[in-house]
Image: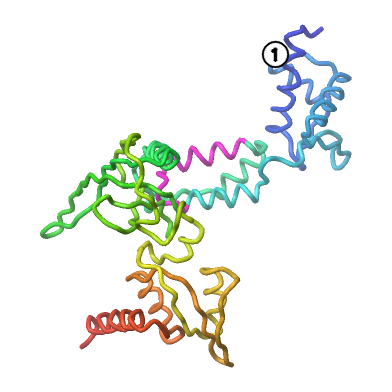
Amino acid sequence: MPGRADSKLKTLYLCDILREKTDEDHPMSAADICKELDDRGVGAERKSIYANLEVLRQYNLDVVKTSTPKKGFFLGDREFQPVELRLISDAIQSASFISQSNSRKLIEKFEKNLSIYQRENFRKQVYVDQKNKTDNDAIYYRIDELAAAIDKKCRARVTYERRRLEEGTAVRNETRIMTVSPYAMMWFNDHYYLICNNAKYDNLMHLRIERIKRVDVLEHEPVRPVEEVSEYTERFDTADYSNKIFEGFSGTVESVELRCAHELYETIADHFGNKLAIIDANDDTFTVRVDVATSEGFAGWVLKFGTKMQVISPRHVREMVRETAEAVARQYAL
C-alpha cells in the first residue's frame, strides 16, 4: 500500500505525467498512469487515479477523457498551444539582441509546456540563425539594471561600446561612458533600445541595449523631467513614440501632411494606426495628416516609396526630403 508521503506526491506527479506524456494524440489509460507513477517511486491503485484526476479538474486543469482512437486521459488546454509557442519562438529567433545561447535556453523553457511528442515536432521547425545574433550573453543583467533605474526614476551611468572602422580595414571597439536619464526600453527594427536623455543634450537618444556593457544605477540622482526633452508631460508614452520614429532615428515631432497612392493605405495604417486623419482623397491618392519625428530616418522612409508618397507640408520638411533625394541622386550621377 502507498505510504502517506506517496499520497502527498501522487497528485503532483500525476500533473507532470499529463503535461509531459499526454496530448490529444497520445492519451494514457489509468493503468498506464499507475505504471508511470510506479516508475517515479509513487505507488497508486487504479481506482485512486480517478479521484486524483478529479482533484486536478477542480484545480481547473483541463483533463480530458477520451475513448477514440484509444481510451484514456490527456491534458487538453495548456498555458500555451503549439501554434502560440511557434509565434514566440519565431520572435525569439528574429531578435538579434538575444544571443544564440540565450535564445536556445528561452525556447527550451517554453518547450516544457508541450508534451514530449509535441516537442519532437516543434524542434524540427526551430532554427536559430547565428549570423544576426549578438554575442552579449549578459544582456539580461543590463535589462534588469535599466528597468530598476526606470522604475526608481533615477539616472544611470552606462558604458556603451560601438564598432568603428579605422584606416584600411581594421575594426576597433570604441567605448563611451555617459550619464543618462532612462525613460523606456523599446523593441523596433529587430533591436532593443533604451530611450533616454544624455545629460549633455536637450533631446532624446536611442542606445542599443546589447551594446551597453555596464550599468551603474545612480539612486540619488533623479532623472531629468521628460517634458524638458520631449513633447510628453509627466510620463513617457512608449506606444505613441513608437508610431512617430523611423528607422531608429529620433527627432522633433511635427504634424506632417503626406499625399499617398491608394495602395499605400495599408502601410500608413500599419504604422500610424487605423484612426488616420485623412484630409483629402481622389481616385488615385489620399492626403493624410500624421505626427512624426522628422529626421533622416523619416526622409529615407518617405523616399523608399518613390513617386507613391510625397510630403506636402510643412515646407521645411518637404525641403529636407528633397535635399536628401538630391544627395542620393548625386551619388549615382554618371
Secondary structure under badge 1? loop
Q: Compared to 191, does 279 lie above or below?
A: below
Quadrant in which residue 165 is drawn: bottom left
Q: Residues within 10 Å of mark 1 (few under 14, many from 20)?
A: few
- Compare residues 120 and 311 and report the one nearer the observer: 311
User: Residue shown at 43%/70% (left/top)?
Assistant: 292
Q: Compared to 237, does 25 lie above or below?
A: above
User: Residue shown at 77%/34% (left/top)?
Assistant: 61
For the C terminus, the image quarter is bottom left
The amino acid on which the numbered mark 1 sits, given as a three-letter code, is Gly
User: Residue shown at 22%/86% (left/top)?
Assistant: 333
Residue annotated with mark 1:
41
Quadrant in which residue 100 is drawn: top left
- Compare residues 248 and 7 and report the one nearer the observer: 248
x then y, percent, for residue 67: 89, 39
Quadrant in which residue 141 is drawn: top left
Q: Which residues are magenta?
A: 94-112
User: Residue shown at 79%/21% (left/top)?
Assistant: 34
Residue lying farthest to the bottom in this orientation: 283
Q: Is residue 299 left or right of residue 267?
A: left
- Compare residues 32 and 219 and report the one nearer the observer: 219
x then y, percent, for residue 48: 86, 19
x then y, percent, for residue 316: 33, 81
**Residue 97 falls within the magenta-colored stretch:** yes
Main SS class of the magenta portion in the image: helix
Q: Is residue 287 left or right of residue 119?
A: left
For the N terminus, the image quarter is top right
Q: Is residue 127 left or right of residue 26?
A: left
Residue lying farthest to the left in this orientation: 167
- Compare residues 213 and 180 and report the one nearer the observer: 180
x then y, percent, for residue 288: 52, 80
**Residue 310 falls within the magenta-colored stretch:** no
